[in-house]
């Protein structure tokens, strides 16, 4: 439960409204641009920072999905939900 509280306490960004698939697709585009090269150092750094933000959004979605699965499995087994 402490992990959930930390997520809820984290500052919200406009990216938090993104769905998993949209954030993942945007992250893939950032990676593609970085791999293609041809950008200035400043542009590359901005892309990297954007990629880090998007990766965090994706990780939050995956963490939430894992928590839901764990809770469903625990309920199915009749045990207490994991914290």
Image: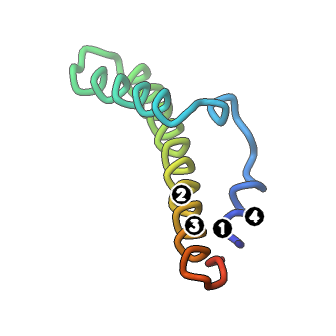
Q: Which residue is mark 4?
A: 5
Instruction: Kindly report the distance in space between the C-alpha atoms of the residues bearing marks 3 and 4.
Output: 19 Å
SS at mark 4? helix
* Label 4: how many Cα within 10 Å (few below 14, some 14–19, many 20+): few
Marks 2 and 3, the one that precedes in the sequence: 2
SS at mark 3? helix
At horizontal 43% and vertical 25% (from top left) the residue drawn is 26
The disc placed on residue 72 is: 3
> Marks 4 and 1: CB-CB under 8 Å?
yes
In front of the other: label 2 or label 3?
Answer: 3
Q: Residue furthest bottom?
A: 79
Q: Is residue 8 left or right of residue 36?
A: right
Q: Which residue is mark 2?
A: 63
Q: Position of residue 54 (x, y in %)?
A: 50, 36
At horizontal 74% and vertical 40% (from top left) the residue drawn is 12
> Marks 3 and 4: CB-CB under 8 Å?
no
Marks 2 and 4, the one that precedes in the sequence: 4
Image quadrant occupied by the C terminus = bottom right
Q: Position of residue 66 (x, y in %)?
A: 51, 61
Image quadrant occupied by the N terminus = bottom right
Q: Position of residue 63 (x, y in %)?
A: 53, 57
Q: Residue furthest top?
A: 38
SS at mark 2? helix
Q: Which residue is mark 1?
A: 3
> Marks 2 and 1: CB-CB under 8 Å?
yes
């Amino acid at each position: 439960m402490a992990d959930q509280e930390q997520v809820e306490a984290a500052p919200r960004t406009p990216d938090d409204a993104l769905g998993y698939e949209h954030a993942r697709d945007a992250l893939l585009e950032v990676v593609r641009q970085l791999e293609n090269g041809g950008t200035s150092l400043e542009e590359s750094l901005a892309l990297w920072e954007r990629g880090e933000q998007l990766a965090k959004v994706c990780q939050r979605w995956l963490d939430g999905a894992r928590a839901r699965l764990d809770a469903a499995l625990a309920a199915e087994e009749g045990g207490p939900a994991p914290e």
